[in-house]
């Protein structure tokens, strides 16, 4: 699995322990690549016997046997129950070991910061959230260091030694949020000059990665997404509805973040509102917009930030927001597909499933109503990660960099 991001190595020891991500010309480099290849195949396809791994990777049976034995010895693979056939010895499927490695993911958001610890399978083992009025580098660094220390202290020593990295997901250019009418936002200017990845990394012995928050959520879909109902597309546009709306882009099975790390910045896409005025997608399809609509209607808005599946919002207000968000999303999708010929759009966010599904249905209808001669309309489907996508996506950055290869190395067609 490939991605573009900024990496801060917190110590020389971390840099020395990082595996190369490409084929090496020497034996150790080649082995590192092949081990990644085996782990990537098993992560994508599930537990399987050595013969199936050899078939999918193109490696010899002997090579696969040696690699899988080494990965088992290292605690990255575990044996499943033997599968008996009609003749011969039973085959033994091998799967990823949940405790093989652990990853930390930090999300710095407009209303709060979150840190989670996940295992090698992507299961969240610990989670902490702290609200703030406005995000500042000081409160992000302090929160992260305190929570990391607590998480590591609660892990058995052997597991703590397997923490392979910290990923940080945050909106880029946060200083653009500064409002002259809100003195409290003055602290946002500090984001211009602060490197929180380096600051946090200085306290820990593992590498630290930094990524745009919406791209990180897209990475969570790419690495941990549940695509049992549909095969994961090789190219897709990803939409995440949070405090602000953002996006991510996957091309040829790789997360593409662009030169500045801000590719697929859907919130900034110009659209025409239902009132016929030019605005940006962020103005109509963000949860902060829904919050303001509820406030103007005299309704409570706390439930939309509570991470629960029951939004008791006045249905009339919610319907109005869904309609305007869908109209805006359809325009942004149409503009995007004219530039990049992707077949699928995945919509996810900090939304209950029923709200997300209603948004998808309305977006499909809005897209169908647009005149798009000569352009194929993409399929619009739900994302599969949900509320934890940004923090889990941050954690996936270290996993991808240290244990996976580009999916095109083993997936055909």
Image (tube, rainbow, N blue to C red):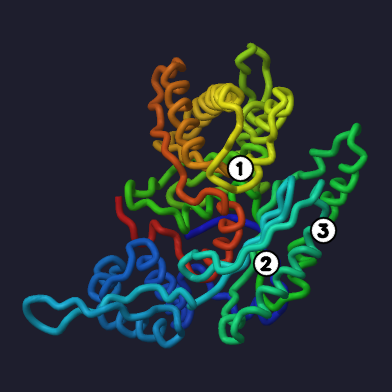
Label at residue 95? none
Q: Earlier in the sequence, mark 3 or mark 1?
A: 3
Say which of 51 and 393 sits in front.
393
Asked which secondary structure carries label 3, the reply is: helix
Residue 396 drawn above or below residue 368: below
Measured Cα–Cα span from mark 1 to mark 2: 21 Å
Measured Cα–Cα span from mark 3 to mark 1: 27 Å
Asked which secondary structure carries label 1, the reply is: loop
Give the residue at mark 3: 139
Measured Cα–Cα span from mark 3 to mark 2: 18 Å
Q: Tell me where residue 280 sits by quadrant.
A: top right
Q: In this view, does 142 lie to the left or right of 83?
A: right
Q: Is residue 133 left or right of residue 49?
A: right
Task: Let me know if residue 340 appears in the view.
Answer: yes
Task: Let me know if residue 331 appears in the view.
Answer: no
Q: Residue furthest right?
A: 183
Give the residue at mark 1: 263
Q: Tell me where residue 30 sits by quadrant.
A: bottom left
**Which residue is at 45% across, 37% downward?**
345
The x and y percentages for residue 239 are 54, 39
- Closest to the camera, between mark 3 and mark 2, is 3
**Which residue is at 72% across, 25% downward?**
298
Mark 1 crowd level (few <14, some 14–19, many ≥20, 10 Å Cα): some
């Amino acid at each position: 699995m490939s991605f573009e991001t900024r990496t801060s190595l917190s110590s020389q020891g971390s840099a020395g322990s990082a595996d190369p991500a490409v084929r090496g010309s020497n034996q150790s480099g080649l082995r590192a690549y092949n081990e990644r290849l085996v782990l990537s195949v098993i992560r994508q396809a599930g537990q399987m016997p050595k013969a199936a791994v050899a078939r999918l990777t193109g490696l010899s049976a002997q090579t696969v046997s040696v690699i899988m034995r080494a990965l088992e010895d290292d605690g990255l693979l575990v044996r499943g129950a033997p599968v008996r056939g009609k003749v011969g010895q039973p085959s033994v499927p091998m799967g990823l070991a949940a405790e093989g490695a652990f990853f930390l993911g930090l999300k710095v958001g407009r209303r709060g910061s979150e840190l989670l610890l996940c295992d090698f399978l992507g299961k969240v083992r610990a989670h902490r959230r702290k609200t703030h009025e406005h995000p500042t580098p000081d409160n992000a660094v302090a929160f992260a260091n305190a929570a990391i220390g607590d998480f590591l202290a609660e892990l058995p020593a052997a597991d703590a030694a397997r923490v392979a990295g910290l990923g940080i997901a945050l909106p880029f250019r946060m200083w653009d949020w500064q409002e002259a009418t809100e003195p409290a936002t003055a602290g946002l200017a500090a984001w211009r000059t602060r490197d929180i990845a380096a600051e946090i990394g200085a306290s820990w012995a593992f590498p630290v990665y930094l990524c745009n928050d919406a791209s990180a959520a897209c990475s969570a879909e790419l690495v941990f997404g549940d695509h049992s109902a549909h095969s994961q597309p090789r190219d897709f546009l990803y939409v995440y509805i949070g405090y602000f709306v953002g996006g991510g882009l996957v091309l040829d099975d790789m997360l593409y973040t662009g030169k500045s790390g801000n590719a697929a910045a859907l919130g900034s896409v110009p659209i025409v509102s239902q009132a016929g005025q030019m605005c940006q997608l962020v103005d109509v399809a963000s949860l902060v917009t829904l919050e303001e609509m509820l406030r103007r209607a005299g309704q409570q808005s706390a439930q939309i930030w509570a991470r629960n599946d029951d939004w008791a919002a006045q249905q009339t207000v919610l319907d109005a927001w869904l309609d305007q968000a869908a109209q805006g999303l359809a325009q942004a999708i149409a503009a995007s597909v004219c530039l990049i010929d992707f077949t699928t759009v995945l919509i996810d966010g900090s939304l209950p499933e029923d709200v997300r599904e209603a948004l998808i249905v309305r977006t499909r209808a809005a897209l169908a109503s647009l005149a798009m001669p000569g352009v194929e309309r993409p399929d619009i489907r739900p994302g599969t990660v949900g509320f934890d996508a940004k923090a889990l996506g941050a954690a996936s950055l270290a996993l991808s960099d240290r244990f996976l290869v580009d999916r095109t190395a083993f997936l055909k067609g």
